[in-house]
Image (tube, grey):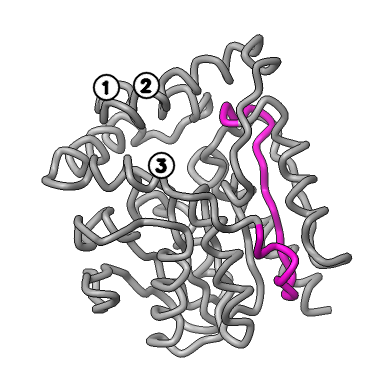
Amino acid sequence: MPEFLNVDGGTLAYEVTGSGPLMVLAHGIGQSRDAYRFMVPELVAAGYRVAAVDLRGSGESTATWPSYTRTDVAGDLIALIQHLGGPAVLVGHSISGGAATIAAAKAPALVSAVVELAPFTRKVEYSLTALGLSRYRKGATAISAVAMLGSHKQWRKYLEIATPEPRPADWAASLERTDAMLHEPGRMKALQKQMNSAADAGAQLGNVHCPVLVVMGTLDPDWGDPKAEGEAIVAALPEGVGRLEMLPGAGHYPHIQFPSAVVGLVRSFLETARA
């Protein structure tokens, strides 16, 4: 069962499992803490106290907030880590990857390491050249319809594009859960505002001094060249801070397609960081 934390005039839902060093998991837009349903048990078994949180506007958190920027989300994550007794390893997917960057820059004593999964950390630059790639073109078309029209059908289509095979056994059920959530009052509007929020994380990359792992899927439709995006994030960090891992066959949701592989990358990264 979730617990709740009052932050910035709203309420965040989160769930804590296990004992040991704290690890906070933050999902991407249009999702909920359910996105980490496969990783949580493995991380708990590895000896972590894992807190999976619903972002503002998502899951069981309050739907309507004044704004939904990465800086806002970073503030929420900092407040949660303080509440739970940090420091914490902060794992962020997509928009939360950018938020994790900001949190690490603004509260270095509370963030011991950052893992960014397919992160929207830098400002998005659409590529006309990449439109020749089917996955990029189809993904961009679906996302544009969601951003402009709030289309539930197009969001589901995007999830299908962004999560190629292999998919989990509960894939169809997970789509239904996501669709039901986004039909709750205010949820789709929150997704649109998150999607259209200012790209305010890239400027903080140079201020992050804890170890950072960036994980990109080779089939992520959100970039024409996912590896180049990951390399650009690492290059913008202080020298020696960042590390990039590419996950073959993964789309925009590597933690759903290949949870055990992502957990393995995270554990290896943290062991190296502690050495």
x%, y% of residue 182? Answer: 21, 40
Type of residue at label 2? Lys
Q: CA distance from mark 1 to mark 3?
A: 16 Å
Q: Residues within 10 Å of mark 3 (few under 14, many from 20)?
A: many
Viewer-nearest residue: 266 or 241: 241
Q: Which mark is residue 52?
A: none
Q: Is residue 220 magenta?
A: yes
Label 1 with label 2: CB-CB less than 8 Å: yes
* N-terminal label among 1 and 3: 1
Q: Secondary structure at mark 1?
A: helix
Quarter the N terminus occupies: bottom left
Q: Which residue extends farthest right? A: 239
Q: What kind of residue is marked 3? A: Met
Circle 2 residues within 10 Å: few <14, some 14–19, many ≥20? some
The disc labelled 1 sits on which kind of residue?
Answer: Lys
Q: How many marks?
A: 3
Q: Which residues are magenta?
A: 203-222
Q: Up-down: is 113 above or below 213?
A: below
Q: How far apart are the two marked residues, 3 and 2, measured between alpha carbons?
A: 16 Å
Residue 157, disc: 2
Mark 1 and mark 2: Cα distance apart in space: 6 Å
Instruction: State the residue position of label 1.
Output: 153
Closer mark to the observer between disc 3 and disc 2: 3
Query: Which residue is at 30% across, 29% downward?
Result: 172
Identify the residue shown where x is 53% and y is 58%: 92
Instruction: Let me know if residue 154 is in the magenta part.
Output: no
* Residue highlighted by disc 3: 195
